[in-house]
Image (cartoon, helix red, strand yellow):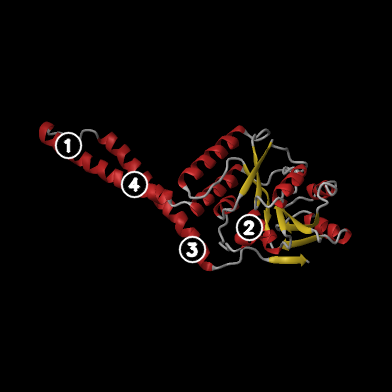
Amino acid sequence: MEKKLLTIIVPCYNEEESLPLFYNAINEMKEQLASVNIEFMLVDDGSTDNTLEICRQLHSADERVRYVSFSRNFGKEAGIYAGLEKSKGDYVVIMDADLQDPPEMLPEMLAYIESGEYQCVATRRVSRKGEPPIRSWFARRFYRIMNKISNTDVVDGARDYQMMTRKVVDAIVSMKEYNRFSKGIFGWVGFKRKWLEFENVERVAGESKWSFWELLIYAIDGIVAFSTMPLILASVFGVVMCVVAFAFIIIIIVRTLIFGDPTDGWPSMVCIILLVSGIQLMCIGVLGQYLSKAYLETKGRPIYLVQEEVE
């Protein structure tokens, strides 16, 4: 019986130090993964270091290694999509090159997939040891908010590290939206999913490419992509402020008729004006986020552009 093919997708951005270590770590697992053939799909996301050269060297030494290099940095979401789109495996797994996704979990993930009971085996971190406390706090709040306001399941601590059958991969690739939020997409497509937990692992080399600001923007993109709740809240704020304003008008008229002092209380009026103005600007900003995403989608631009590719 012919072995199934497992494609290991590795999005890379400036991972010249980590990539050889990752490649060696996977090769050390070959006995535990003997039931499948393995191919590597390396996605160079416009790296500015020697990542592309490392990809070339690995391909020259091992025909199982394929790679694609973008014309510029398009972001990890584009890298994941390109890897899924170009993967050939019956099973596909997404992993980071920095070894924060433990290769030791691959045999267990493969066993669940091969059993036929699950179409996807996903992973989540149960701790955030080594992360700045403020980042961890905001991350947990994001997952909690996201699950309350959206119709997709985003598990706290979920990683992009997951193994999928070809049917799940094809479903994800069919979603060609430009503004991508993979964690939401993975939950939205459904299919029977098994969750595996692990403790946070430090990077084997290099530094994180995600700043706090970039993570905040990514979180906003996720909310906009999978929920219209911010628009509903903006409408609710508008109605509430109209009611409050009408109540204040009545209070001012009654107070003027009784006390005859219409100018008293101007500091509080200034505060109210500033509050209402702030809410208005916030609501306009929320609306602008949705309009900007719709604008980018209507352009129909490709998710990524390829500079170099080896099949």
Which amino acid, by three-letter code, is at mark 4?
Answer: Val
Give whichever of discs 1 and 4 has the lower sequence position: 4
**Quadrant holding the N terminus:** bottom right
Q: Position of residue 217 (x, y in %)?
A: 55, 48
Name the foreground residue: 127 vs 113. Answer: 113
Q: Nearer the viewer, residue 277 or 307?
A: 307
Nearer to us: label 2 or label 1: 2
* 1 vs 3, front mark: 3
Mark 2 or mark 3, earlier in chain: 2
Measured Cα–Cα span from mark 4 to mark 2: 38 Å
Instruction: Name the N-terminal-most of marks 1 and 3.
Output: 1
Mark 3 crowd level (few <14, some 14–19, many ≥20, 10 Å Cα): few
Residue receiving disc 1: 262
Q: Is the Cβ of the residue at disc 2 closer than 8 Å to that at disc 1? A: no
- Going by the image, does 259 lie left or right of 19? left
Foreground: 24 or 73? Answer: 24
Residue bearing the label numbered 4: 236
- Residue 227: horizontal and vertical position, in percent? 47, 51
The residue where tag 2 is placed is 168
Q: Would you name the residue on which mark 3 appears?
A: 295
Badge nearest the viewer, 2 or 3: 2
Amino acid type of disc 1? Pro
Q: Earlier in the sequence, mark 4 or mark 2?
A: 2
Q: Are marks 2 and 3 in contact (CB under 8 Å)?
A: no
Answer left or right for 27 relative to 101: right
Q: Position of residue 27 (x, y in %)?
A: 84, 49
